[in-house]
Image (cartoon, rainbow, N blue to C red):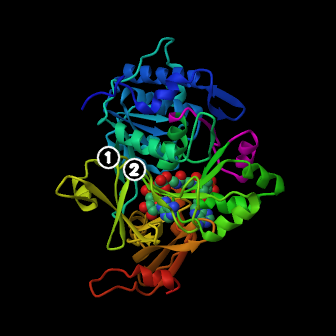
């Protein structure tokens, strides 16, 4: 594969070129592109010094912060593959991602006991320390090649353990660029980023998308309606949300807050269905119609309602330029430059998820059931599998939670199902059949599940036995319809 024309990552073009213009607002600070360029060059040099080289994986266990952004860009400059990791993980979740990715270095922003317990001898450094190592004249970029991996982002699947989605430099750049062009993002924009930096939405769209167009990002390290309104008042132009945020904003906005949000040029929403009711309520409150889009860790950004023209309630719009879609047996399939190269070291999962046509076009099977309006506008009907849930925009594998609950001595069998939840989209519910004479409370179950907080059961339903079909498969749809068994 040839190197990019100047051997550097195309997403960083503006980071190098915009000089004194503001790249990142965080708290009361305005950090220029030149400053960010220097900070990330320092990180790149520090990586070199530690022997972390192009193609190596660096796990970034970072909250939303300037240091985090600098570390991320430092990796991208040197072709070090970014593996973003949720800092709220517990030991088992960290251990899986670190071992599976083969991370050569772990970068953390604060010492986390669960992470330390999972290191298994891997070197770890704080983002602070890495930045402090920066020499006055730091290393340059690259060489970075089109087909090099840039990002290995883990996502939950139906089988329990999360899988790494391996994205190339060119794929990531193409995916991000197509959407930013569609939404007319320019250097005049300031994007409010209240999202975690360990998912596609906050990392690839809100952060890299903005920086790649020379726009500024206002980091809101912890979402709250007040913080978003404050960010809007300080001159932001775009806010990227998930439905839980919209729900909370609707519950909290006073007239001034609604006016501040109404002055934005664009509010987007993704990651789970935004109800038509919330879209209309937000419109009535702020005068803005939220633009809903659809994407996946595997495909990056796939479908979007239009910037100009009707933003259809309950629908996710049309393919972004360069993306092809088709519907096979009601399932959405995607072929796009932004689709990952492969699941990391999982040819079995690739074989299940990709269909390659005779002429070489690859289609990714999303697992999402869709319906098309007469004019091709896509509506997401749901997931084909009951083994995947979305809580607050986070994708969860019910198998991962079930495996932990099965290990509890009181449990004979368990099924985890997602129950509808107005705020979170879905709520984790454990349906359990107990062993003879055993007892179990929700609090005991929650204490037993050693996973990120968002995966802990919020409801426990005790049943005599799980409903199963003739083949022995648990009928989750029956449980969801009547979870009290
Ligand atoms: C979880 N919690 C619940 C609950 N589910 N509480 C009550 N009822 C439920 N049903 C609690 C947990 O116990 C935990 O508590 C906390 O909520 C979870 O942590 P959190 O998610 O950080 O909560 P919060 O700080 O309130 O933030 C809400 C949020 C956040 C909406 C801001 O969830 C968020 O940032 N979501 C975005 C996820 C995202 O980026 N998705 C995009 C995926 S990429 P405690 O004690 O810890 O507070 C994608 C593809 C694409 O979709 O194209 O972009
Ligand atoms: P993730 O892997 O976390 O990026 O989650 C991707 C999944 O989120 C998709 O396969 C969909 O099931 C869901 N999703 C993303 N955007 C939307 C949306 N706008 N409406 C409904 N579901 C969505």
Q: Is residue 199 visible?
A: no
Q: Toward which corner of the image does residue 45 lie, by quadrant?
A: top left
- Give yes or no for residue 69 being in the magenta stretch: no
Find out if the beta carbon at label 1 lies less than 8 Å from the nearest ligand 2 atom: no
Q: Nearer the viewer, mark 1 or mark 2?
A: 2
Instruction: Report the residue marked by disc 2.
Output: 154
The residue at 37%/21% (across/down) is 48
Is residue 378 shown above or below 322? below
Q: Which residue is denoted by mark 1 in the rendering? A: 100
Pick whichever of labels 1 and 2 is earlier in the sequence. 1
Query: Percent from the top left, x then y, of residue 131?
Result: 52, 23
Q: Position of residue 296 (x, y in %)?
A: 43, 55
For the residues marked 1 and 2, what is the alpha-carbon distance in whole angstroms?
A: 10 Å
Residue drawn at (36%, 42%), measured in percent from left and top?
A: 171
Residues drawn in magenta: 212-236
Give SS at disc 1. Answer: helix
Report the residue that reaches farthest toward the right.
255
Report if the CB atoms under discs 1 and 2 are less than 8 Å apart: yes
Place of residue 401 in the rendered image (x, y in percent of width and height, measured from the top left): 43, 65
Q: In the rendering, which numbered label is found on residue 24?
A: none
User: Residue 77's x, y, as percent?
Assistant: 41, 27
Identify whether 181 is placed above or below 401: above
Residue 164 appears in the picture as rendered: yes
Please state if 120 lies on the left or on the right of 136 as rendered: left
Q: Residue furthest top?
A: 137
């Amino acid at each position: 594969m040839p190197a990019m024309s100047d051997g550097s990552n195309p997403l960083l073009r503006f980071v190098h070129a915009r000089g004194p213009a503001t790249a990142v607002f965080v708290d009361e600070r305005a950090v220029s592109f030149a400053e960010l360029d220097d900070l990330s060059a320092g990180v790149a040099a520090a990586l070199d010094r530690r022997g972390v080289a192009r193609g190596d994986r660096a796990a970034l266990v970072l909250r939303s912060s300037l240091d985090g952004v600098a570390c991320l860009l430092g990796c991208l400059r040197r072709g070090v593959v970014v593996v973003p990791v949720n800092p709220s993980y517990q030991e088992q979740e960290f251990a899986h991602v670190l071992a599976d990715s083969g991370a050569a270095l772990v970068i953390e922003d604060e010492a986390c006991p669960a992470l330390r317990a999972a290191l298994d001898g891997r070197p770890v450094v704080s983002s602070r320390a890495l930045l402090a190592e920066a020499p006055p004249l730091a290393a340059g970029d690259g060489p970075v090649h089109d087909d090099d991996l840039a990002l290995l982002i883990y996502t939950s699947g139906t089988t329990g353990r999360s899988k790494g989605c391996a994205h190339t430099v060119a794929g990531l750049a193409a995916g991000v660029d197509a959407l930013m062009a569609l939404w007319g993002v320019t250097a005049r924009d300031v994007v409010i980023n209240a999202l975690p930096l360990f998912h596609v939405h906050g990392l690839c769209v809100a952060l890299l998308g903005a920086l790649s167009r020379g726009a500024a990002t206002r980091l809101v390290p912890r979402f709250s309606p007040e913080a978003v309104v404050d960010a809007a008042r300080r001159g932001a132009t775009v806010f990227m949300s998930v439905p839980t945020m919209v729900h909370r904003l609707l519950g909290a906005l006073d007239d001034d807050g609604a006016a501040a949000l109404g002055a934005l040029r664009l509010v987007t929403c993704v990651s789970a269905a935004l109800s038509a009711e919330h879209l209309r309520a937000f419109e009535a409150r702020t005068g803005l119609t939220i633009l809903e889009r659809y994407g996946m860790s595997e495909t990056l950004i796939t479908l979007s309602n239009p910037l100009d023209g009707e933003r259809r309630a309950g629908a996710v719009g049309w393919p972004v330029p360069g993306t092809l879609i088709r519907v096979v047996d009601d399932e959405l399939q995607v072929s796009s430059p932004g689709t990952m190269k492969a699941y990391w070291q999982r040819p079995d999962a690739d074989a299940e998820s990709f269909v390659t046509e005779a002429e070489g076009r690859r289609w990714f099977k999303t697992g999402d059931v869709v319906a098309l309006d007469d004019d091709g506008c896509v509506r997401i009907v749901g997931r084909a599998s009951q083994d995947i849930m979305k809580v607050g925009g986070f994708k969860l594998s019910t198998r991962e939670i079930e495996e932990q609950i099965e290990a509890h001595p009181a449990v004979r069998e368990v099924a985890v199902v997602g129950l509808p939840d107005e705020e979170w989209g879905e709520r984790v519910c454990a349906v359990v059949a107990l062993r003879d004479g055993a007892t179990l409370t929700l609090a005991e179950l929650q204490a037993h599940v050693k996973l990120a907080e968002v995966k802990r059961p919020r409801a426990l339903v005790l049943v005599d036995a799980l409903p199963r079909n003739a083949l022995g498969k648990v009928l989750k749809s029956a449980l969801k319809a009547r979870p009290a068994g």
